Image (spheres, rainbow, N blue to C red):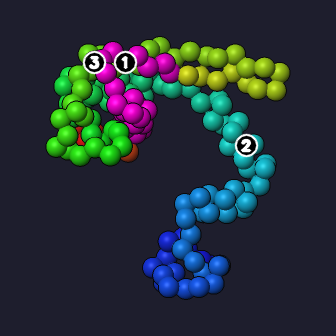
Amino acid sequence: ARKAFAADDVGTSSPTDKKMTPMEASIRVQDDVSPDVIKAARAELLKYRVSQETLQRLRDGLKLFEGTHSFHNYTRRMGADNASATRYILKFAPLEPVLVPGSEDQPETQWVPVQVTGQSFLLNQIRKMISAAVDHARGVVSTERVTQS
């Protein structure tokens, strides 16, 4: 079977042997997954509710961003030595989860609002910080890694 990004793909000219991009890999996976599997997975995701433990880990992850830091890794085209990447965040915390009502064909979904108060923000900064905090809450990124970033 062919593997995405295989080292032996380099230098081949056949369209089926070329390096696969992430978008091409995603399309192939989507083509291989049946609608029934997608429907079942979606139903499970819609039933998910965040636990108090996970919410506390998210709270801890967001708190790591409070204070004055260089956020050069949370925007585009800025180096670590760029002083304009330094920002001050007064408060960054999740609020209580809310259930958004669904419709006849759409069940209700749970959302966790997040409140951030700070000086000013860089392009994509908030979205990328929330992503890092969610990864921290899921346990896939350590506190040290978030602090280093």
Q: Are marks 1 and 2 in contact (CB under 8 Å)?
A: no
> Which segment did they paint magenta?
112-139
Res 116 label: 1
The amino acid on which the numbered mark 3 sits, given as a three-letter code, is Gln
**Along the horizontal axis of the image, is 10 left or right of 30?**
left
Work out which quarter of the rendered image holds the N terminus and state it: bottom right
Q: Quadrant of residue 139?
A: top left
Q: Which mark is residue 40?
A: 2
For the residue pair 48 and 77, the one nearer the viewer reads as 77
Tell me the distance, in whole angstroms, between the alpha carbons under discs 1 and 2. Answer: 35 Å
| Disc 3 versus disc 2: nearer the observer | 3
Task: State the image coordinates of residue 2 (x, y, percent, origin top left).
Answer: 59, 77
Residues under labels 3 and 1: Cα distance?
A: 10 Å
Crowd tier of the residue under label 3, counting other residues whose Cα lies within 10 Å: few below 14, some 14–19, many 20 or above: few
Callout 2 amino acid: Ala
Q: Is residue 62 left or right of residue 1?
A: left
In what element is the residue under mark 2? Answer: helix
Magenta run includes residue 44: no
Which residue sits at x=56%, y=15%?
Answer: 98
Q: Is residue 39 left or right of residue 81?
A: right
